Amino acid sequence: SVGDCNGAFIRLDPGTRFLTVRDIDCHDSQDGILGSNAGHLLIEDSIFTGNGFGNGQAHGIYVDGGEVLIRRCRIFSTKNAGHSLKSGARKLTVEDSIIAALNAHNSRALDAYAGGDVVLLRNVIQQGPQSDNSDVIGLALEASRLQPSNHSLRMEDNWVIYDGSSRGKLIRGQKLGPITIQNNTFVGLSEMGIDGVNEIGNRWLPSRKQ
């Protein structure tokens, strides 16, 4: 916790390269992990709970730069309108993880504000009744900070659960490259939210009961 409300459990100094973060329990920080990665950042087997502070500018994890791999992690209950995961990375891969607002006041589960290559494999992703947005994923929403090339989104074998009072949509943003959404289960979502998606073998269920 610091005076500018952007205190981080781990802050990446400029030029950080080839960092591995493993087996940590980060809770109640203003930010979980914050900063720019110039090489490859691996975050695995870790828990992030109750991070975020202020007016939505502090997040569960907030990283940009090169390549980021998040594996077997849990990001729970990001608060005060922060995104559970905010990424400006050139390539972001999240696999075998849980990103869940539960009943906390987050903004989105994932905000890939710069676009880039985004891969989501075998995760559980949930937006809760207190979440600010009815969309789960923000894609390339900050025009002044887009990655200069290589934009794509691949989602495969995920469960995405929207527990808001109205039906939500999966993606808000712009399509700058191929988007493939395959073999996922969507609960409580009414629409994809973006045109031009290659959609294969997904299940759309209106509620948890179904």
Image (tube, rainbow, N blue to C red):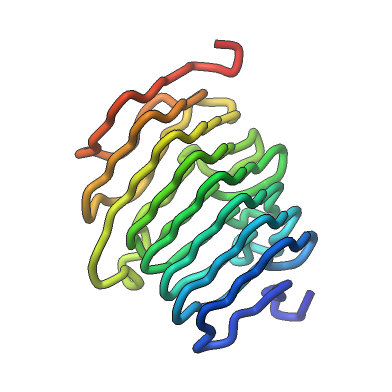
Residue furthest to the top: 210
Vertical arrangement, residue 18 with respect to residue 96, above or below: below
The x, y position of residue 12, in whole percent, is: 60, 80
Vertical arrangement, residue 25 with respect to residue 148, above or below: above
How many labels were placed on the picture? 0
In the picture provided, is 88 more to the left or to the right than 150? right
The residue lying toward the viewer, choosing from 167 and 210, is 210
**The quadrant where residue 125 appears:** top right
The x, y position of residue 120, in whole percent, is: 44, 46
Residue ID at (73%, 72%): 9
**The quadrant where residue 48 appears:** bottom right
The x, y position of residue 160, in whole percent, is: 51, 33
Residue ID at (65%, 79%): 11
Residue ID at (50%, 61%): 69
Name the image quarter holding the N terminus: bottom right
Name the image quarter holding the C terminus: top right
Residue ID at (24%, 64%): 150
